[in-house]
Amino acid sequence: MTETTLSPRKRPPTSADAERLPIAALLALAMTGFICIVTETLPAGLLPQIGEGLRVSQSLAGQMVTAYALGSLLAAIPLTIATRGWRRRNVLLLTIVGFLVFNSVTALSSNYGLTLVSRFFAGTAAGLAWSLLAGYARRMVAPHQQGRAMAIAMVGTPVALSLGVPLGTWLGAFAGWRTAFGIMSLLTLALIVWVQVKVPDYPGQSGRDPLPLRRVFTTPGVRPVLGVVIAWMLAHNILYTYVAPFVAPAGLAAHVDKVLLLFGLAALASIGIAGRWVDRRLRSGVLISLAAFALTALALGLWTASPQVVYAGVAVWGLTFGGAATFLQTALADTAGDGADVALSMNVVAWNGAIAGGGLLGGVLLETTGVASLPWAVLALLCVGWLVAWSARARGFPAGPRASSGVVAGH
């Protein structure tokens, strides 16, 4: 960094300036996350139209989601390591340009194979983006503000789930699925300008200390946090992937859109709670969220056929999920220190692996033991996650305020 000489006409920065969060820059990161989520999930609501447009079955059209997730899984760690020495804004812009190019190809392609390839590479852009966003947000602010900054930077996820996905599905049904992907490309164009104007740049990390993958993975506390990520997200995705058959016994098969909207709005509301808790009560936030989700799974298992219990359970589930990304990525970055970017790329792999694993495990349970078994599997996974988080008191999920423990993000 270079020193800047203040003009005599400019007032020196005050303590109020130091406390002010760079909202515009953080919201640009949130917009990047929003595009990641909507790009990933948009095909799920448009399978009939996509299948007809590409002349394939709906099951083959659904592989657009699989290809995207596979790209994220395979690319997150190697791309993060390969770009650690690059200037951070250049890496961020690279991911956004990736969305621009590959969403545009998806919108214009009439070839199924080409569409799958473009979805795979859109997934690689997402894998790199998710490993970058949390660390980028932390570098913009003082250590005691990092939790709040991450809460703002992660708000794109619940917004996408609660508003973006239903809106994209409606738009695709109304104006065509290609139009929906075309609009995603237009959003990325606007985001490129936004990032250039509002997001500060930072140097990459020195190549003299590459922090190999194994060293970061064996850092005390990293594996417990990743273990909680896997258990929590597996539990979430078992229910989320099969929410339609799960709510059918309660007579809500025709109201899945309302159920998902309730979940998304509750998740969105919990972002504010997570932002207030993460810097002072991160450990408590994780333990309370896991416990509340577990009790919700228990209630859903006992009263599966009650629409009142299902609606109430979905609302609590959303409240516990909305802050998960903020809590878990903060804990992982704090624990990994200078290896935060590499650790967060592992988080991308764990998170996307849990998406795939939740779909696989939930599907097996649905076919073999029926929909009533889903909440019990969720409950078992959450109990494991809670025990791992509870045991990681020294490293991973330490007690007390983050600032008081002297945790500073690696720059």
Image (cartoon, helix red, strand yellow):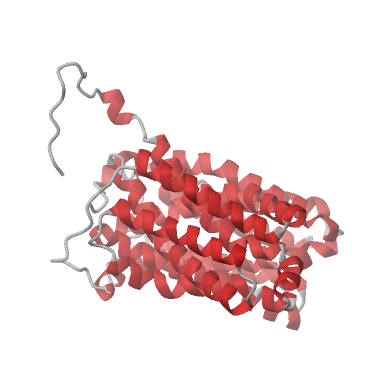
Q: Residue furthest bottom?
A: 368
Give the camera-side residue of 195 and 399.
Answer: 195
Residue 66 quadrant: bottom right
Label tally = 0
The percent position of residue 141, horizontal first and vertical second, equals 30, 40
Depth order, front residue of 144/59: 59
- Residue 378 in view (yes/no): yes
Q: Furthest residue to the right?
A: 251
Residue 123 image point, x, y percent:
49, 67
Above or below 199: residue 95: below
- Residue 221 appears anywhere in the view: no
Image location of residue 353, percent across then percent down = 51, 73
Residue at image position (23%, 56%) is: 204
Q: Who's the residue at 51% across and 72% down the image?
A: 120
Residue found farthest to the top = 9
In the displayed structure, 349 sits above or below 183; it is: below
Front residue (pair 325, 76): 76
Q: Residue drawn 38% across and 65% down?
A: 345
Image height of 199 relative to 53, above or below:
above
Instruction: Locate the N terminus and report the quarter of the image it occupies.
Output: top left
The image quadrant of residue 165 is bottom right
Q: Which residue is drawn at 71% across and 56% down?
A: 172
Where is residue 341 shown, x and y percent of the image?
31, 61
